[in-house]
Amino acid sequence: MKRVALFGGTFDPIHRGHQFIAERALEQCDLDEVVFLPCRQSPHKLSLETTGGEDRLAMVRLAIAGFSKMWASDRELLRDGASYSWQAAEHWRQEVLDEEDKLYWIVGMDQWASLSKWARVDYLSDLVTFIVFPRHGEAPEVALGRDAVFLPDAKAASATEIRTRASKGLSIEEYVEGQVAAYIHEKGLYRDA
């Protein structure tokens, strides 16, 4: 039996907090792999302009290059329209994994708290077990009808803060891998953030 966790998000940019979450999930849930799924367009951030998918995927791949049990999929970037978690989970459950394999979905505390607003969340809940990372010592509430594993606090990091720092020419190496910082600098990403 294989144990796979999907980690969806904009990853604009991916930061050390994302890596920490994936590492903790691997260790504490005895996962075989974590698959990063950069989305084309988050249905929760339709008005937010994001960096191009190719650049976000490249940054994810750079950030996780040293982790043998982590990889990034471009599947959501190649789809049209918004990326819905239930569609991604359905694809993995039906097309990629075997019936006995276990599928997880990694979410942060903020996403867990707003799960009821997600499209087809009951169906998604039938497909996955959630791995929930609280922040700042907050205790997540158990949601009836949703299988979940609650892990210790994640490292605080803000993609918004990273974009702002990059736009001002400030160092971001504390928040992102060196290769990701170099990529952002070389491509001139977030200059207008």
Image: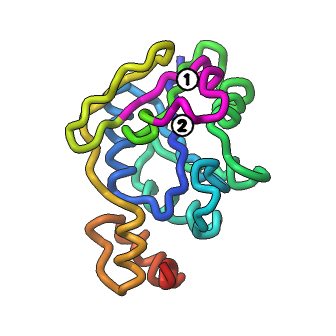
Coordinates of residue 121 in the picture (x, y in percent): 60, 27
Q: Above or below — where is 193 with respect to 74?
A: below
* Secondary structure type for disc 2: strand
* Secondary structure type for disc 1: loop
Q: Above or below — where is 138 with respect to 168?
A: above
- Residue underneath mark 2: 6
- Residue underneath mark 1: 128
Please identify the quarter of the rendering in which residue 24 is found. top left
Q: Above or below — where is 47 with respect to 83?
A: below
| Amino acid at dot 1 | Val
Magenta-highlighted residues: 114-132
Coordinates of residue 11 in the picture (x, y in percent): 50, 57
Q: Is residue 119 magenta?
A: yes
Coordinates of residue 137 in the picture (x, y in percent): 20, 38
Q: Above or below — where is 84 with respect to 151?
A: below
Coordinates of residue 33 in the picture (x, y in percent): 48, 35
